[in-house]
Each structure stands twice: as C-alpha cells, then as structure tokens.
Amino acid sequence: MSIINYAKKEISFKIVYYGAGVVGKTVNLQYIHRTLPDDNRGNLISLATGDERTLFFDFLPVSTQSVRNFVAKFQLYTVPGQVYYNMTRKLVLRGVDGIVFVADSQWDRLQENLESFKNLEENLREYDYDLAELPYVIQYNKRDLPNVAPVEYLEFLLNRRSRRVPYFEAVAVDGRGVFDTLNTVSRMVLVNGFAQEQGASSR
Amino acid sequence: MSTHDVAIHEEAAGRIDGILLRFLEESSAVDALLIDRSGQLLARGGTSRSLDTVSLSALAAGAFSSTAAMARLVGEPEFTMLFHQGLKENIHVAAVDDQAILLAVFDHRTTVGMVRLFAKEATAAIGTVLAESKGRPVRTGDLAAPLADGEGARMFKERG
C-alpha cells in the first residue's frame, strides 16, 4: 500500500524481508545500512533478543533521488523467523507493498524454507493479500557454504507458482546479491506507485 | 487486495497540518505525528527540534498493532490509546481510524489528561479529512503516466 504525499512530493512503500530463522534477513539490512551513502538511509533499528535473533522486526528506511519529481522512500522490515513468533510476523506484514523471500540454500534447511513460504502465504491471506498480485523476489542466500542445493532445485521448490519471479543468488554477509535484490524489488514496487497501462493489473 | 493506496493531496495536507498545530497549541504537547498503521509517517506538527520521526513512526505503529493483538486476546476489539511515561518525556498514541494513529510527545508542561482530551478532538477532525481524501484519485500529475523502461532502475548503489 503506497503512500503518496503530494504536498511533500514523496512516495513511500513498505518492503518486508521474510523467511525462516537465521537465513540472513537481518544481515541483508545490516549490509545495506553499512554500505549505502548516509544521504540515502536512516537509522537501523533492531528489536532483537539477547542472542541476536529478531524478536519483533528490524527496520531500515532508505530513499532515492527523485523519480519524476517524487522522492521514493522504502521502509525495509524483517520479520522474526522462528516459528513461535507468528503473531508478530503477521503484524509486520500489514500494509506491505513488496516482499523479499530469503531462503537458506543449505540442504538441511530446505524444509524450513518451504514451511516459511507456506506461512507467508497464510499470513498474507489474513490481510486478503495474494502473492499472485504482490511484487516479490526470492533470494537464495549462503551460496558460499559447502552443503548447498543447486539453484535449479531451489527454484523447483520455491519458485513454481504460475508467475515465476526474479531470484538472486546471495552471500549476504559479503554483500553479494544484496543490492541486486533490493534494486529489483524496489523497482517492481515503484511501478505500482505510478498509474498503470490501460488494461494492466494495478498490482 | 483489501488495502488501498493512500494519497495525501496538498489541500488535505494543509488541513491536517492545521489540525495538528491547533492540537499542539491546545494540549501543550511538544510534537504530534500522524502515522499510518503500516508504520509510515503521514504528517508532522511541531518541527522545532530534531527527532527521528521515521523510526518513531515504525516503532509506534508496531507497538500499537501489538497492543491491538493483545486486546483481541482478551476479547476487546482494540485498545484505543497507549501511554508511555518517561522521566521527562511521555508519549501518547491514539487511534484515528482503521488506517492511522496520532502520536503526541509531551513533557511536564501539560498532563496526560489534557493530551488525551485534545487528542480526541484532533483524531476526529483528522478522521474526517482522511475519509474525504479516500474519494479522490490517487495518482495525478507526475504519477499519472506509467513508469517508463529505465525509470527507477538501480535506484540504490553501494558507496564507492
């Protein structure tokens, strides 16, 4: 749900990084925070437990140079990945404009990725959102580890809906794939901030 | 999709600014933020000091939505206000409608009762403006034509 402020010439969107526990959602935001020029970002806020797991959400506001006279602002959120935090995960999805689904590429985490994706679909349904209409991308993270599944297999597991979405291989700790993911999802979301071609879906 | 895009046109922005300024005058609160429930700042009254309003908005919306979830667990539809007491500064958050909340920061110069009283008036007035805005076209002017190929491409770059 974009927010357009004609008085301030701003257009704002909410992007949520979703995925199972310890797949690297927070690491994506930390890398963006560390490497984006100061003018393009605000403070990174992490509501985490003592052992650095996200308790409620992480939050990083980023903004761009103006696009057709409007400053585009994106609020990046993560959700807590652990299964038992579903209530807070659901709250963070409120008003979401775009999603980055972060998957752990390791063989022994595949089941958790699948469950998290299913959980995402269920939680979106409670807001009457539908992944078929919502802009989203998939990031296969931790590609540097030894026991990772081939991308083709991950694609077969997670990117098999009628609409195939862009995917990115990533090593978020080193920044690999992080900005490709961000730039693609934010462009997809931005398209929705403008009028649509006649006959095109608004989402 | 059940949610709709929110557009604050210049005329509505002016009316909301006026309501927020009057609220600050009457309640003697220091800052007033109108926040969308998804966590985005819609308008600010009182710009006299530097305040990380973007973070404050995200956190307040998170806190408000989690108290709403708590309310439902005990059989209430929603807790309509939230009050955080500090040593010097306090925060009062009130529901405007199902889309927005009003956050006020205040100190010893006023009381929670005064803030609550005038917040009630302000939220009702803002609710009217937002309801009227809903009938207006969302994308006009610069946003009225679709994004062209290449526009908005690679918006973010790492520091070189």
Image (tube, rainbow, N blue to C red):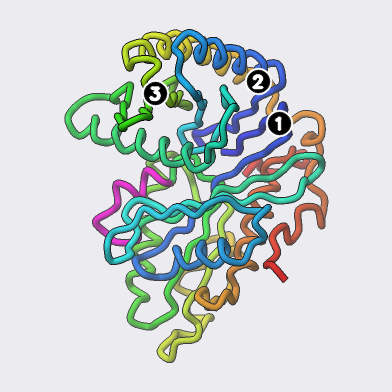
Q: Chain of mark 2?
A: B
Spatial CA distance of label 3 from label 1 is: 29 Å
How many other residues sit within 10 Å of disc 3, few (<14), some (14-19) or many (≥20)? Answer: some
Q: Is residue A143 depicted above or below A161 in this figure?
A: below
Q: Is residue B84 visible?
A: yes
Amino acid type, residue under disc 1 in the picture: Lys
Query: Which residue, given by chain and number where applicable, does mark 1 sit on?
Result: A8
Amino acid type, residue under disc 3 in the picture: Asp
How many other residues sit within 10 Å of disc 1, few (<14), some (14-19) or many (≥20)? Answer: some
Amino acid type, residue under disc 2 in the picture: Ala
Percent across and percent down for residue A138 are 53, 66
Whether the residues at callouts 2 and 1 have beta carbons within 8 Å, the answer is yes
Percent across and percent down for residue A181 are 60, 65
Q: Report the span colored magenta.
A: A81-92
**Nearest the camera: A58 or A106?**
A58
Query: Which residue, given by chain and number where applicable, does mark 2 sit on?
Result: B13
Query: Which residue, given by chain and number where applicable, does mark 3 sit on?
Result: B107
Q: Residue at x 81, y 38 (%)?
A: B145
